[in-house]
Each structure stands twice: as C-alpha cells, then as structure tokens.
Image (cartoon, helix red, strand yellow):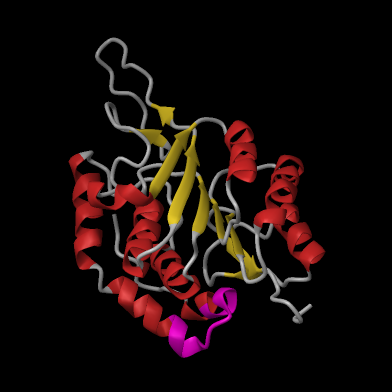
Amino acid sequence: MEEETDADPGWVSELSGSPLVAGEGAIEEARRQKRLFGHLSREHRREGRASYVEIDAPLELHALVRLLGPQHVVEVGVSSGVSSAYLLHAMEMNGRGTLHSVDLPKRLPVPKDGRAPPRSSWALPRGRESGWAVPFSLRKRWDLRIGDKAGVLPLFAKELPRIDLIVYDVPHRDRTTKDEFRALDPLVPSGGVAIVDHGPGGELCGALRGWARRVGAEPHGRRGLGLFGFQKPRMGET
C-alpha cells in the first residue's frame, strides 16, 4: 500500500468542529504511526498486491477519532482492513471506544484449467478473511460482523446506545441508503459525524445530502477524493 501524502487537515477540522491547527496536529500524529503503516504494507505485499479497495484517507480517519473521542463507531465495508486498523489504533490511543464493522466479502473464484483467477479490487486473497491485515493487538476493540449490511445495520440500530461516527464505504443506491441512514440517525448525537465514500471522483450522493439537510448540517468534501461527510449540529447551532 502507498503512504498517504496529501492529507486534508481542513476537512478534519470542518468535520470535528476543531481549529485548523488541531486538525493539522492530529494528521501529523497519524502520519507518525510508522509501525502501523509498516505492518499493513507488509501484509499487503505478502499477498502480492499494492493495495485493496479502501478509503484513501486513513490519516484523516485516525485524526477524527483522536479529536472526537468516539465511544461507538460504525464502519460499513472492511476489505483488507486498512481503514479499520487506523480507526482502531486511534481508539487505542484514546483508551476508549469500540469499532462495529460489517462486511460482505467477495472471494476469488476457484481457478480452472490451471488458469489464475482474475484480479479484483474487492476480492479477498485465498485463505484470508475480512480485515485480515489488521494487527491482532488492535482487535480487542473490534466488533466485526460478516454479512449483508441490510441485516446487520438494523442490529446495530437496536443494540448500540449511540453512534458517534459512521464510515460508509460500500457501493450504494440512494433509495436503500436513505432508509439505512434514517434508521441510524436517532442514535447519532449532536456532534456526531457521518462519512460516505463515493469512489474516486464521485459526487455527493442524494442519500447523504438529504440526511444532512434533515438535520441542518452542511456536507464537506475531502479535497481530491469522492469523500463527503458532515457533523450533526450541536445544540443551539441549527
């Protein structure tokens, strides 16, 4: 995997409601986690891949967790677990928090006639499971569930007392995603943050735009990526 070199502290500042200097400091702190980056990079190289589909802003995710201090984070989409690892590492530094992830892994087909299966940016390497690159030392704070988000997200809505940060990183259709966001919204407190990855160059989807409008928030885009998010207004800010 490649090291992130163009992190956007302004985006972190906007989503966390923190001064820009705090966003810059949190980004630099995330960048200094060389041991974590080295572990993830080695795990990917062992599988002969430079990277797998992930949010291209792990430093920003780490920084947001450090600034927000969330108790419960919901992550939709895991793949090899780069984003998961940075979220978990920041929680470990905070000394609090649980990451609740859901993933429906795609697997490579069994090769036929000695031919190698086609590469896929989503598919797991043979013999690996979702989040396989995440260091075992970070997994004690991880509630990882394998299954369709249509079945797992309603469980999160029933089981969790609150959701302080949502990271939604799977292909989606507005109609379905709108219903999912409506179900989760009552658990997101004032000051909570929702982030959706729309893929490289993707534009803000109607589902996130509508959710932000309902709560009186303004979506912010991460510079150079199809990442958008908003912070739910705090009391007295709407």
- Residue 116 drawn above or below residue 40: above
| Left or right: 184, with 225 as reference point | right
Answer with the quarter of the image where residue 212 lies. bottom right
Q: Give the main secondary structure, helix, strand or loop, of the magenta stretch.
A: helix
Residue at position x 36%, y 59% from top? Answer: 86
Give the residues drawn in magenta, as a range. Answer: 13-23
Answer with the quarter of the image where residue 130 lies. top left
Say whether residue 15 is magenta: yes
217 or 235: nearer the viewer: 235
Residue at position x 52%, y 69% from top? Answer: 224
Residue at position x 34%, y 33% from top? Answer: 129
Q: Position of residue 187 (x, y in %)?
A: 66, 55
| Left or right: 110, with 227 as reference point | left
Q: Position of residue 170 (x, y in %)?
A: 55, 44
Residue at position x 58%, y 80% from top? Answer: 17
95 or 229: nearer the viewer: 95
